[in-house]
Image (cartoon, grey):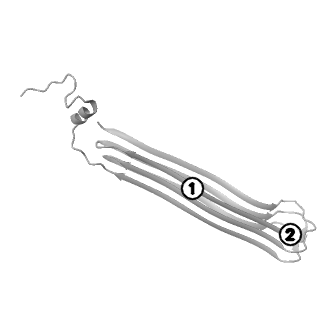
Amino acid sequence: GDSTGVGASIAINVSNMAVEAEVADGAGVSGANDLTLEATGSGENTTEGLGGATGKASSTGVGGAIVISVIEQDTKARIGTDLGTTSVAGDISVDATHHGKSTTEAKADATASTAIGASIAVAYVEDGATAHIARTMSAGGSVSLTAHADGSSETTATASAEGVKDDGSKADDQKGAATGLGPLGVGEVEPEH
């Protein structure tokens, strides 16, 4: 007889990455020739969800996938607050470099007489780099602040539903094939003509 097959998946990825090079708030710096802060961060994330169902004639197949990604990645180089002026005899360099890549994919397939395939992919992705000086500073040489960031995010949702050909059998034929009783059940008698 009729049957229903369901294949579903749910994938959730929450990733927080923070890379910091910092002179903390209130931390003193004295007697320095050069002051260099470098922060380098790299984060790559892949989130996948696959769902599928297959059925034969007179059946229902439902395939579904829901995928959610929440990715926050930050790279920071910072000289924090302090009272007065921080003096350096030479150069001051504050540099932050960040690379981020995120892939979110939902895929659902269904094959049956009645087939339903549905997929949802949602991604919130934030990649960033900051270089910051939060105090008064004096340098005998150059002062350089640089922040480099690259980030890519790819989100894909695909779904397919495919019907199967009716083999022409009737309910009695299917019952007989499943039970081995033939088209007539136990206790049933072929009517006379």
In this picture, residue 135 sits left or right of residue 57: right
Q: Please, what secondary structure does the residue beneath circle 2 have?
A: strand
Q: Quadrant of the C terminus?
A: top left
Task: Report the residue marked by disc 1.
Answer: 46
Q: Nearer the viewer, mark 1 or mark 2?
A: 1
How many numbered marks appear?
2
Mark 2, residue position:
136
Name the side, left or right, on which 47 lies relative to 1. right
**Which residue does the image show at 42% across and 47% down from the upper left?**
52
Locate the N terminus by quadrant.
top left
The answer to which quarter of the image holds residue 148 is bottom right
Vertical placement of 62 versus 96: above or below? above
Q: In what element is the residue under mark 1?
A: strand
Amino acid marked by disc 1: Thr
Looking at the image, which residue is at 61% across and 51% down? 14
| Cα distance between the residues tagged 1 and 2 | 42 Å
Comparing 39 with 62, the one in front is: 39
